[in-house]
Amino acid sequence: CAEVSDASDEESVQTKRRKVSNKHEPCNLRPAPFFHYIDYSGEPDEDPLAPLTPPCCPANFPAKMHAMLSRKDISDIVAWLPHGRAWRVLKPKAFASEVAPAYFGHSKYASFVRQANGWGFRRMTTGRDRGAYYHERFLRGLPHLCKKMRRQGVAEKKSIKPEHEPDLHRISEMHPLPEKASADD
């Protein structure tokens, strides 16, 4: 939360006390179903000719995830959830032995999860999407949003209380996503 500057009038002092006493309360909390979630589904591709990752560099984690999730032949192992705002590994052992080596060069599920966390993906801990991972800029059919994703430092990822996790089903009813990217047609 923004700090309140020191002021001499009583109203500002009371406001400052209120802010300090609520320092553990969430800041910038939006109404349900969003809470901390920002919907980027309407954001256009500013440079449609630019690839998800620069040609000089290997594909980054989000680009690999989009490629992986677009494959129907492994959708029984890892797949988008119906609303397209989160994905879930359905068979962790098969994922580690069959899918991860092809995309990430290793067969350690824990390393994959650590990589997902490092890119800012959050794991849902409650509700219908429990165990699924989501990121505000990682949406089915909108891979261009990945261009704005960056690896995060530990201090950048704020914890979210389970009761403030977004309801991705309700958000998708309000802002539906395409079934697949237009380039996949």
Image (cartoon, grey):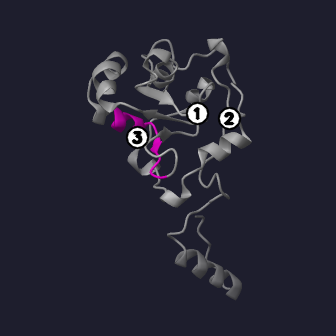
Residue 101 image point, x, y percent = 30, 19
**Quarter of the figure with the N terminus:** bottom right
Classify mark 3: helix, strand or loop.
helix
Marks 3/1: CA–CA distance: 22 Å
Q: Is residue 74 left or right of residue 1?
A: left
From the viewer's side, name the closer residue of 17 and 161.
161
* Residue 107 locus on image (x, y percent): 26, 24
In this view, which residue lies farthest toward the bottom? Answer: 10
Q: Quadrant of residue 118?
A: top left
Q: Which mark is residue 41?
A: 2
Q: Looking at the rendering, which quadrant does residue 181 occupy? A: top right
Label 1 packing within 10 angstroms: few (<14), some (14-19), many (20+)? few
Q: Earlier in the sequence, mark 1 or mark 2?
A: 2
**Secondary element at image label 2:** loop
- Magenta stretch: includes residue 179: no
Q: Could you tell me which residue is drawn at 73 percent across and 43 percent down? A: 174
Question: Which tag, 3 or 1, sits closer to the chain's start?
Answer: 1
Residue located beneath label 1 in the image: 82
Q: In front: 88, or 12?
A: 88
Magenta residues?
112-126
- Residues packed near mark 3 inside 10 Å, few (<14), some (14 to 19) or many (20 plus): some
Badge number at residue 159? none
Q: Position of residue 166 (x, y in %)?
A: 58, 50
Q: Which mark is residue 117?
A: 3
Closest to the camera, between mark 3 and mark 1, is 1
Q: CA distance from mark 3 to mark 2?
A: 21 Å
